[in-house]
Amino acid sequence: MTDPPHIAVIDIGKTNAKLALVDLETLCERAVVTRPNTVLPGPPWPHFDVEGHWAFLLDALGRFQRDHRVDGISVTTHGASAALLDGAGALAAPVLDYEHTGPDTCTEAYDAIRPTFAETGSPRLGMGLNLGAQLFWQFGQDPGLLARTRHVVTYPQYWGHRLTGIASTDVTSLGCHTDLWNPHAQAFSSLVDRLGIRDKIAPARESGDILGPILPGIAAATGLSPATPVVCGIHDSNASLLPHIIARQSPFAVVSSGTWVIVMAVGGDTVSLDPARDTLINVSALGQPVPSARFMGGREYEVIRQGVASEPTGADVGQVLKDEVMLLPAVEPGCGPFRGARMRWAPVEPAVGSGRRDVALAYYLALMTAECLKMTGARGDIVVEGPFARNRQYLQMLETAARRPVTGSDSMTGTSTGAAMLFRRTRAEKLHQAVSTPPGDTAMARYAAKWLNLVNSAT
């Protein structure tokens, strides 16, 4: 097909739902609109507001078509979510919020059937972060649900199904700690048989496969051409990774920041991943296993700032380094490289809204990222995507701790660019990046070393 110049990207993150219009000639977003991804209460369980998102997306697609033109649609979403579709293509049950603790009530029973880390590269996680645990719990909660379910589709493909009527899954979403995928065999894991969904889980496709054109009703509602193609879709952190896989020589690492900070090492050292420290094997859009590690950095950022913004000054930076003001893990103790550790400030907690608090927070997030890089065997240059790419203190401490170049991407949302590039995977030379941040001085290096020593002495 001819490369379409304007791609509308549906981007459903854990915090916000977005529609971005990406110009494939420049790889820039020409327009972005957002809405909060508010979780609705039960019954039967806390779930995502898919109907609210759908109305928002149809309206935005219509506006993008009128103002710019839409030539194709791509989809990227957070992981750990699936939709269960009935025979009519409607939801057989609401899409469960993966932060619901319901699946924790059947831990022992689920653990008895889940595959090993050696098979799936998927660590055992709490709540519904293992998609297999979600399904196991949902089928137990609603005994008729399994029979009502005709198709199990991963979350990007739920939106693809609404747009095209085609049911599918994609390898990147299946490879996101679901327990449902064997990245070594590039096939479904043994869990699909144990859950009884072998004949229900939709076919696994590459993220860039064209599902088909939009349905006639979508064209009528939005003004888009009935021939508008829709790609299969991609997990969000893998969307951030794709442009770099295409454009860069390995080894390198990509840090995708958002609600989750995902570190992905391409072509790094061979290491033994420790599932107890939130490491895993992701699967790239090209089907390749990618050693990864993660922590809930965006959520931690919001928790510590408490909604109060500040603009750190050079004096704030100097004071934090002089007094060695440190935030120690873990703000979100249920995930990350220091799971179970109790958050604390040393020597004292800076005031909420102060520049010193923001500097210490940025350093904490950078040092957590550096630990994730080390655990995954990452080598080569480091590229930061998402909101943290604009945080100077974060970039400078990360470069200091990792001891190699760090570049912050200037894209408004790296996931949008990557998802749009599913339409054009042979050209990525126009990646937009800011100038690399200079490394810190010896005071920053001493700070990083002391932070790590304090963390290690407490674990």
Image (cartoon, helix red, strand yellow):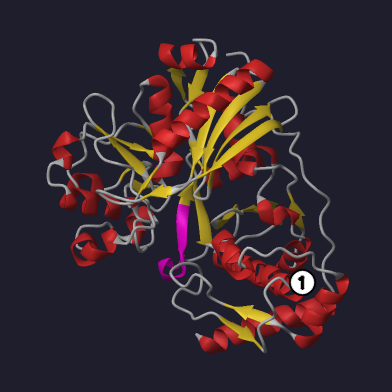
Residue 169, position as x, y percentages in the image: 37, 35
- Report the label total: 1
User: Is residue 320 located in the magenta-colored stretch of the structure?
Assistant: no
Which picture quadrant has residue 160?
Answer: top left
What are the residue bounds of the magenta stretch? 273-281
Residue 51 position (above or below residue 249): above
The correct choice, above or below, for 108 with respect to 224 in the image is below
Image spot of residue 96 (x, y percent): 33, 48
Secondary structure of the residue carrying tag 1 is helix
Q: Nearer the viewer, residue 131 or 48?
A: 48
**Residue under numbered circle 1:** 355
Q: Is residue 277 within the magenta segment?
A: yes
How far from the left and from the top, in percent, is residue 199?
A: 20, 34
Q: Nearer the viewer, residue 83 or 313?
A: 313
Of the residues shown, which amino acid type is indicated by label 1?
Gly
Judge by depth and name the residue closer to the eye, 57 or 235. Answer: 57
Quarter holding the N terminus? top right
Residue shown at the point (50%, 85%) measured from the top left = 459
Task: Give the percent coordinates (x, y) of residue 392.
Answer: 78, 61
Q: Is residue 389 left or right of residue 225?
A: right
Residue, x 46% and y 67% (percent of image)? Answer: 335
Q: Based on the displayed image, in which of its 4 quarters is residue 212 positioned? A: top left
Q: Residue at x 65, y 22 (%)?
A: 6
Q: Relative to residue 263, is residue 166 depicted above or below?
A: above
Q: Is residue 282 above or below residue 396?
A: above
Q: Is residue 188 visible?
A: yes
Question: Is 200 left or right of 164, judged from the image as shown?
Answer: left
Instruction: Specify whether residue 157 is in view.
Output: no
* Residue at 17%, 41% in the rendered image: 145
* CA neighbours of label 1 inside 10 A, class few (<14), some (14 to 19), many (20+): many
